[in-house]
Image (tube, helix red, strand yellow):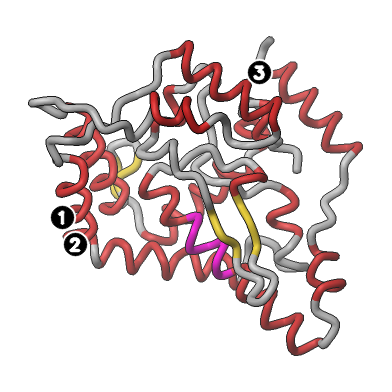
Amino acid sequence: MTVDKKLQNYADISNKIRPVFRHYFLEQYLKPGVWFERQQNYIKSVAASSMIGYVLGIGDRHVQNILIDKHTGEVIHIDFGIAFEMGKNLPTPETVPFRLTRDIVDGMGISGVEGVFRKSCEKTLEVLRNNQTVILAILEVLLYDPLYSWNVLSNKKANRRQQQAYLSGGSGDESEAEEGLGVPIRRDINVTAERTLMQVEEKLLGQEDNKYISVEGQVQMLIFNATSKRNLCQVFAGWQPYL
């Protein structure tokens, strides 16, 4: 199926399903002050998790892997079996840096991705850049541990993982995860670790397409890529990009 056909299918589905997540905050938090505070918590937590998820290349962010704390309004991510850009190597590659679909944006209120969300993204990315030495040092210890290798799923296993996640409504069978990403395997040379550290370092330096860009420019590019209909229509169906 061509990209144009996928885009048309995505548009058709989107026209039939309207984003409604803003109603969650109106129905859950009846006092205006509490509603405002919880919504602000939600926006800031989405911004922080998005920037961190981008830097660490965390994928598989379908709706079952993003929860919300009813007490604070903050989002909680689970299942980090696909990280360090491994989602791009799946049979159906992930084409967005993080989940910023219509319902996620709808919960932010009338301002959407502007205002608090954008500023929170910029502040989070700025903090990550300023602490890149510490972040890379921690990752280097983890990735160069001789007992671990962040290897890539074979196409067959990766495809089975995606299909199981789609059919079961979850993130896949745990036994498959043990065979796939983040599996403890003994190796003498971890080439994947070197490539992973380089990718993370480039993100923290603001290097995109061999060009260095500002924090504001990087955030703008990420928001554009995450909300692009052309990118979303190419994501695996079980990811439910139309929600």
Residue 3 vs residue 21, the one in the foreground: 21
Which of the labelled discs sits on residue 134, or is there none?
2
Residue 154 picture location, percent across and down: 40, 15
Residue 63 picture location, percent across and down: 67, 45
Q: Earlier in the sequence, mark 1 or mark 3?
A: 3
Where does the magenta region start and end?
44-50
Left or right: where 30 falls relative to 46: right
Q: Residues within 10 Å of mark 1 (few under 14, many from 20)?
A: few
- The chief SS type of the magenta part is helix
Asked if marks 1 and 3 touch (Cβ < 8 Å), the reply is no
**Three-letter residue code for mark 3:** Val
Against 182, residue 110 (above or below) is below
Distance (Cα) linking label 1 and label 3: 40 Å
Q: Quadrant of residue 85?
A: top left
Dot 3: what SS? helix
**Three-letter residue code for mark 2:** Val
Q: Disc 3 designates what residue?
A: 3
Left or right: where 35 falls relative to 81: right
Residue at the outermost right position: 16
**Three-letter residue code for mark 1:** Ala
Residue 159 vs residue 216, the one in the foreground: 159
Asked if marks 2 and 3 touch (Cβ < 8 Å), the reply is no
